[in-house]
Each structure stands twice: as C-alpha cells, then as structure tokens.
Amino acid sequence: MADTSGRLNGDIKTVISTVEDGGENCGIVNARMTYLDSSGTQKVLDYSNFAACGNQGG
C-alpha cells in the first residue's frame, strides 16, 4: 500500500510516475509523485507545483 503521509525524506530510488491537475490552469496546481524508496517500498507524495502553461503570450 502506498504511503500518503506527505513526508519526503529524500529516499527516492525510482520515480514511477508524476501527475498534476491539468486543464487550463496556469499557476499553482496539485501534483502527485509515485516512487520506490531504496527498500523497494512504493510511496506517494502529494505536493503543489506551478503548472506548465501552454501559450503565455508571444
């Protein structure tokens, strides 16, 4: 089962996936990273991230 405690101790061996709330939002969005630590335990980190906005003018 994934750990959703929200704590990051820097023990990331392999990133399995990263996803963020999409849509047309520019600015801060919710994001989630699923990863394996050095013991092979799958964990999940929920965090806030700046959205990668498509057309910012220009």
Image (cartoon, rainbow, N blue to C red):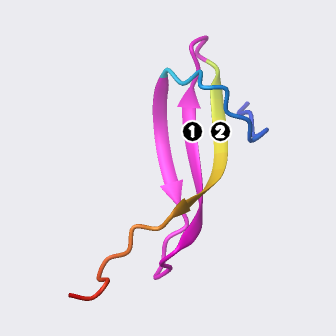
Residue lying furthest front: 58
Q: Pinpoint residue 1: horizontal percent, then vertical percent.
A: 73, 30
Judge by depth and name the residue closer to the eye, 6 or 3: 6
Q: Which mark is residue 51?
A: none
Residue depicted at 58% across the width and 15% down the height: 40
Residue depicted at 56% across the width and 13% down the height: 38
Magenta region includes residue 22 = yes
**Label 2 residue SS:** strand
Magenta region includes residue 24 = yes
Is 4 above or below relative to 27?
Answer: above
Mark 1 / mark 2, whichever is N-terminal: 1
**Label 1 residue SS:** strand
Q: Residue type at mark 1?
A: Thr
Q: CA distance from mark 1 to mark 2?
A: 4 Å
Is 23 above or below relative to 28?
Answer: below
Is 18 above or below relative to 26?
Answer: above
Residue depicted at 55% across the width and 32% down the height: 35
Determine whether label 1 and label 2 are within 8 Å by CB: yes
Residue hosting label 1: 34
> Which quadrant is home to the C terminus?
bottom left
Residue lying furthest top: 39
Q: Residue type at mark 2?
A: Val
Q: Pinpoint residue 10: horizontal percent, then vertical percent.
A: 59, 25
**Magenta range:** 14-40
Residue hosting label 2: 44
